Image (cartoon, rainbow, N blue to C red):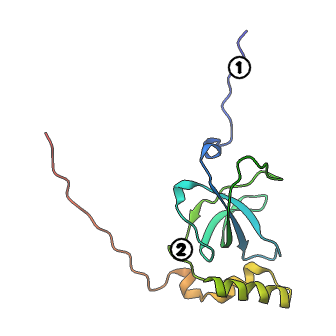
Amino acid sequence: MAPASTNSLFDTSENQQPCGKIATVAFDSGVDNVFDYLLPDKLGVVLPGQRLEAPFGRANKLSSGFCVEVKDNQAGKEPKRRLKFVKKIIDTKPLLDARLLEFGKWLSDFYVCPLGQVLSAMVPAAVKKGTGEKQIKHIFLASRIN
């Protein structure tokens, strides 16, 4: 008798994505820790100081956090636990440069405050919401080819 074929309840297509980098992310939450996430190559280049959207917690709720470090993914080295994937890059350019990130780390250590909250407080709310940004949509007519 042939083994029964069952479809998985979970999306496994994401596990097949090539990931050359790992991002260390600090979320604006009460958790005083940073978390590692796999960066799919299709997202492009991520720099420290950019905001990323990734699943956070047991419920895998999409949350935004600041990338504080980007490391190479060593394929031969087995991670301690299975890493989740970054879903989206929110900012096109880093909101915080290396000097501000170091200052944020110092503030976090000195005042015993979560790094994600410190970094989030360093960026104005209007910038985080995208107030004043202009989106332009270009529409082109396609020529018919018969």
Residue shown at the point (68%, 87%) measured from the top left: 121
Q: Amino acid at mark 2?
A: Asp
Question: Is residue 109 left or right of 54 when viewed as pictured?
Answer: right
Q: How many marks?
A: 2
Residue 91 image label? 2
Residue receiving disc 1: 4
Q: Where, by quadrant of the figure, is residue 62 drawn?
A: bottom right
- Mark 1 and mark 2: Cα distance apart in space: 46 Å
Residue 35, how many percent across, how many down?
76, 66
Q: Can you say whether 54 is above or below 124 in the image?
A: above
Query: Residue 14, relative to residue 104: is it above or below?
Result: above
The residue located at (76%, 80%) in the rendering is 115
Q: Identify the mark nearer the N-term, 1 or 2.
A: 1
Numbered disc in front, either 1 or 2 = 2
Taking depth in this image into account, of 52 and 67 the one nearest to the observer is: 67
Image coords of residue 79 (percent x, y): 79, 52
Instruction: Estimate how packed mark 1 is, as few (under 14), some (14 to 19) or many (20 or more) residues with alpha carbons within 10 Å.
Output: few
Element under label 1? loop
